[in-house]
Image: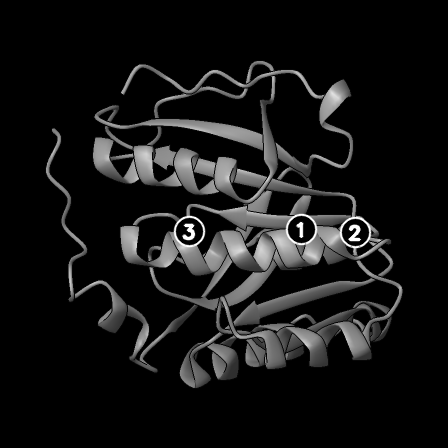
Amino acid sequence: MDEDDDGGGIGSLFLDENYVEQRISIGHHEIPVLSLQCSSMTGLLCGRIGCRKVVMTDHNDIVLKIMRKNVALQQDTALLSRIACEKLEWGNEEQLSLILDKHPEGFDYILGADICYQQCNIPPLIRTVNKLLQHHHCRKFLLAYVSRIQSTDRAFFNEASEHNLELREVEVSRTSPGDGIYSGVIYEIILKRDCHNCRTFTAPNI
């Protein structure tokens, strides 16, 4: 499949407050959440396993409202003090600056889980990642990437290269999620601070 479809309906998928409470088991952690089928547990799990600070972001006010309700559902005072929810539209430097002002210690890891499903969102995402990684306390971006459309894959790799980002595929992370039609992989992404010491990343044959 080589044709791209930015699917105008995807953006409206989350504009619905009819989420239902579920309990998701990950390892020995059981996490209560309000969720749709597509919801991600990444931020809450990071808080549960002891990350000293977790900042979850979204650009949509309804999603932010649900995220904050999910944090409150945890009923763990120590966990509540470690998790924050902030508004961030990719490419919005004002919002990004506000987040970094509130969290000047930066972030050891920036996590993204299956967030490259619309080609039009890739340039602002990559600009945001580049800006974050320029912060002296931000180390790397870990992206769980699902390959669906070849033109979106090409746009992602080209945009990353143009913004001086080096991609490394995490070993043994490649898998076929869901019904096996798509392929998934985790990329470790860093800023090329010294290009003489950066190895070349070869993009998949797309």
Location of mark 3 (residue): 115
Residue 128 lies, in percent from the top left, at 57, 60
Residue 18 shown left or right of residue 181 in the figure: right
Q: Earlier in the sequence, mark 2 or mark 3?
A: 3
Location of mark 1 (residue): 110
Determine whether the residue tagged by mark 2 lies in a helix, strand or loop: loop
C-alpha distance separating marks 1 and 2:
8 Å
Quadrant of the rendered structure where residue 152 is?
top left
Give yes or no for contact between labels 1 and 2 (Cβ–Cβ under 8 Å). Answer: yes
Residue 56 lies, in percent from the top left, at 62, 66
Determine whether the residue tagged by mark 3 lies in a helix, strand or loop: loop
Quadrant of the rendered structure where residue 164 is?
top right
- Closer to the camera in the image, 119 or 165: 165
Up-down: is 107 above or below 195? Answer: below
* Amino acid found under the numbered disc labelled 2: Cys
CA neighbours of label 1 inside 10 A, class few (<14), some (14 to 19), many (20+): many
Q: Residue at x 39, y 40 (%)?
A: 156
- Closer to the camera in the image, 138 or 109: 138
Q: Residue at x 70, y 66 (%)?
A: 55
C-alpha distance separating marks 2 and 3:
20 Å
User: Does residue 149 appear in this view?
Assistant: no
Quadrant (top left/top right/bottom left/bottom right) for the C terminus: top left
Up-down: is 46 above or below 160? Answer: below
CA neighbours of label 3 inside 10 A, class few (<14), some (14 to 19), many (20+): few
